[in-house]
Amino acid sequence: MAACGRPPSLWERVCAEYEAEQPQFPDVPESKLGSVSLEAGILQPLRMEQFYSAPAADTVVQQLLPILEAAPFPEPPDPKTCSPLEYLEYYIFPVLLPGMAELLHRAKEEKCFERKRTKFIACDFLTEWLYNKNPRRKDDSFTEFFSIPFVNDWLKDHPRPPIPLSLLLSEEEASIVIQSFWRGYQVRCDSEIQELRQWQKQLREDKNILKRVKEFWTKQEAKVGSKLEDSEEHRQNHSTSRF
């Protein structure tokens, strides 16, 4: 535990969170289990309750929170002269950790923990979230990932392959596609449909439909070409007769 009069260090908070996560209190009733809020302020000192959720040890967490909150937090240090640890605690983690929490929530919504492949790209989401939550852009409107300037510049030189259609379809749309294909397959397996398809195939082979269509269009192109030549010749004759 941190000494009296100074806030707990990052390592002490991590250790406290790890101890709270361990199931050391099996007699806690399930009705009292809960979760700690994931909300966190921008550019505020790192607090455990802002990004961590430990339902299995809510009682221990509630005991630790007053101790952490009672400790006086000093003013944020100068970002140009502070140590790397202070810079992480005061300027990086207060923004990054809420973004990671939102990332986990969105990944759960996209069923990333249930499927091997999804359309959700975690780096894209985190980039978009951090860009829009930047304190310097608090008065600006929301910007989508592909509209971010540096993302556009990167994708111009490193284009991405298109996302497979199987990942873009929703469950309802995918079920419609699968069901329609299956119904078509069942219809094509019908004996009468098979007989009809065989008759059409034989008809195409006997009459050579493709060749006849090609010859037809060749004749049509020849007729059009001859008409154009006749009109051009008539125009030239008309112009010479005027002189």
Image (cartoon, helix red, strand yellow):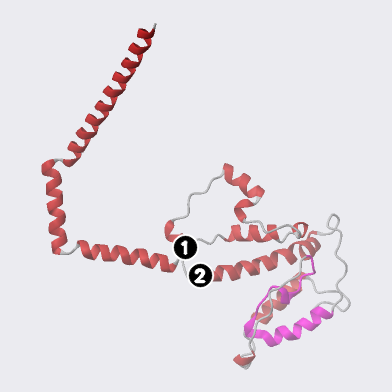
Label 2 residue SS: loop
Check disc 1 and give the amino acid type: Arg
> Of 80 and 101, which appears nearest the observer?
101
Q: Residue at x 84, y 80 (%)?
A: 70
Q: Residue at x 89, y 77 (%)?
A: 5
Q: Residues within 10 Å of mark 2 (few under 14, many from 20)?
A: some
**The image quarter in which residue 81 lies:** bottom right
**The image quarter in which residue 243 lies:** top left
Whether the magenta-drawn stretch holds residue 210 is answered as no
Span colored in magenta: 43-70
Whether the magenta-drawn stretch holds residue 60 is answered as yes
Residue topped by disc 2: 111
Label 1 residue SS: loop
> Of 172 and 153, which appears nearest the observer?
172
Task: Please tell me whether residue 160 is drawn above or below residue 82 in the rendered image.
Answer: above
Q: Position of residue 82 (x, y in %)?
A: 84, 59
The prevailing secondary structure element of the residues shown in magenta is helix
Q: Position of residue 92 (x, y in %)?
A: 74, 62
Q: Residues within 10 Å of mark 1 (few under 14, many from 20)?
A: few
Residue topped by disc 1: 117
What is the CA distance from the residue labelled 1 to the residue labelled 2?
9 Å
Count of numbered circles on the image = 2
**The image quarter in which residue 241 lies:** top left
